[in-house]
């Protein structure tokens, strides 16, 4: 479902609830929880997560042309001019990517709050089991762990592998790449673990 499609509304207050029976309430609860779960961990959400990561790295990579040229032992005017142009383009990519990433995190918070409201409405074994989404949680967990691990490795490998002749700009660029990997990975890890713990708590561990 498109991100522009409105989220399922929160359940009505207890005094306004008018389901004819428990089965109808459970059916609406299942529909809401399934949709909200997809909004948090589904394939579309994972694709958006990876897209924002690629845009962040692309923007920083374009800025990195300027960073590495400035950090050279001998400054090349032509390379410097090229770096300035690509850095401006990189800012045009990086800033929207940061904004989209922050907006998606805020939207996730809204989805989690609404999911908690619907989950607290009742209990139902099959629906509650789907809510935990163990397969999707593991996918997010492994991907995010790989990002964290690679970012941590780069954080040590780049400074150790760059010689003085390569210039310190390469170190700055490599550390920026590592930082984006590390932060993105931690965000994904927090999302996967947090969702599973929330689902277990809301469904009573059943």
Image (cartoon, helix red, strand yellow):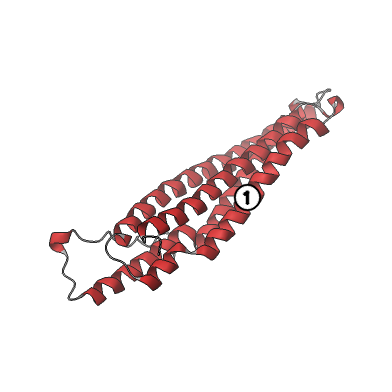
x%, y% of residue 83? 72, 33
The quadrant in which residue 36 appears is bottom left
Mark 1 closeness class: few <14, some 14–19, many ≥20 residues within 10 Å: some
Between 69 and 32, the residue placed more toward the observer is: 32
Does 123 sit above or below residue 181? below
x%, y% of residue 175? 69, 34
Residue that label 1 marks = 145
Does 20 sit above or below residue 187? below
x%, y% of residue 192? 51, 54
Q: Residue at x 55, y 65 (%)?
A: 135
- Whether residue 39 is visible to the viewer of this picture, yes or no, is yes
Q: Quadrant of the C terminus?
A: bottom left
The quadrant in which residue 94 appears is top right
Does 38 sit above or below residue 74? below
Specify whether 164 is left or right of 171: right
Q: Quadrant of the N terminus?
A: bottom left
Q: Residue at x 71, y 35 (%)?
A: 155
Between 57 and 19, the residue placed more toward the observer is: 19
């Amino acid at each position: 479902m498109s991100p522009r499609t409105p989220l399922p509304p929160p359940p009505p207050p207890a005094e306004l609830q008018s389901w004819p029976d428990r089965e109808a309430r459970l059916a609406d609860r299942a529909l809401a929880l399934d949709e909200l779960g997809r909004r948090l961990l589904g394939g579309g959400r994972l694709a958006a997560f990876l897209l924002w990561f690629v845009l962040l790295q692309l923007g920083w990579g374009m800025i990195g042309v300027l960073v590495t040229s400035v950090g050279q032992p001998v400054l090349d005017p032509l390379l410097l001019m090229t770096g300035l142009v690509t850095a401006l383009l990189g800012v045009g990519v990086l800033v929207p990517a940061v904004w989209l990433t922050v907006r998606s995190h805020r939207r996730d918070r809204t989805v989690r709050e609404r999911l908690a409201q619907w989950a607290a409405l009742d209990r139902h074994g099959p629906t509650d089991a789907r809510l935990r989404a163990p397969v999707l949680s593991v996918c997010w967990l492994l991907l995010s762990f790989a990002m964290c691990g690679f970012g941590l490795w780069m954080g040590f490998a780049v400074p150790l592998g760059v010689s003085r002749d390569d210039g310190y700009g390469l170190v700055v660029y490599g550390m920026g790449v590592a930082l984006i990997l590390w932060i993105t990975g931690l965000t994904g890890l927090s999302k996967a673990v947090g969702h599973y713990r929330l689902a277990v708590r809301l469904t009573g561990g059943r």
